[in-house]
Image (spheres, rainbow, N blue to C red):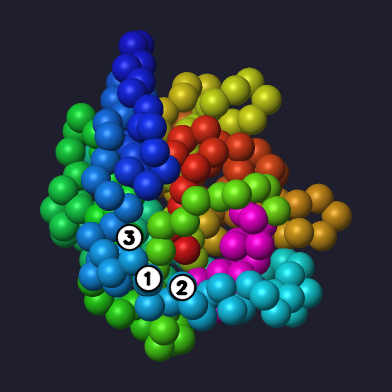
Amino acid sequence: MKLNLLFISSAMALLVLGCSKDQLTQNEGPTMSTNKEFNQGFPKGEFAKNVDKTIGRESKYPTSKTIAVPYYKQETSYWCGPASAKMVNYYFNQPASQTTIANYCGSGPGYGTYIGPLCDWFNSAPLTGYLVLPSWWVWEVTSLASFTDFKNKVQWSFGGYSAPEVWLLMTYPSSTYHLPGWTQNCGHYVAGRGYDFTANSKVYYQDPWYGTGGGANKTIDAYTMYYCITANANCMIY
């Protein structure tokens, strides 16, 4: 197996990968998002999110929370992004096929799915379903300043709003930090479904990969997940 790795030089020119265990090609992506609010330089939800960050969300939200994100396997070797997005859609009772999502995002076998278009997919129609998000809500691609920042954003989404997240990561960046069951390293998406920040910090996720390492209701040490995310483009959708 030959891994052809080309890492981007800027966190703002976000890299978005599909997952193929035979070959990994990382290409430079477009700008963070084509969403109108992003192009104006100030997302509609950013002010509300930043205000919430200043009023002690770590203490006002529960130390553990899981949500019922349904599980779907990816339908091709590079549709981990569309599969993760499908899980989010079905969580909100708004069905969408992986084909529809992949076509919207321009997914391809040589590069997978870029994270900007995937985020725009969520913003293209309000995901309400049985859970009504605040009127100011905008899905955002965010970088992680630290492990604490990752935990705060996880706690904010799940604990505060019962909202899933999509994490872009590397599956096996080191022998110490890697997704359980994986033995090869490739760019990948998973759908976050909760956390437990009590004695031992853990996060819960759905891995759409149809082979070894993939599966429903997965658990991983929170720092390991953070490490895997930073080993890719250090970003996620929340």
Residue under the image location 36 percent in, 32 percent down: 8
**Mark 3 and mark 2: span between their CA atoms?**
14 Å
* Identity of the residue furthest to the top in this view: 1
Amino acid of disc 3: Cys
Which image quarter holds the N terminus? Answer: top left
Asked which secondary structure carries label 2, the reply is helix
Residue 126's disc number:
none
Whether residue 100 sits left or right of residue 166 in the image: it is left
Q: Is residue 155 magenta?
A: yes
Would residue 50 appear left or right of 136 to someone viewing this image? right
Residue 200 to residue 169: above or below: below
Say what amino acid the circle numbered 2 marks: Glu
In which image quadrant can residue 156 be found? bottom right
Give how far across and how far down residue 133 sits, in percent: 45, 83
The mark lying in front, picked from 2 and 1, is 1
Q: In this view, does 62 lie to the left or right of 20?
A: right
Kindly identify the residue that appears in the image at 62 percent across and 54 percent down: 150
Pointer 3 or 1: first along the chain: 1
In this picture, which residue range is highlighted in magenta?
149-163
Q: Tell me the residue that label 2 is attached to.
A: 46
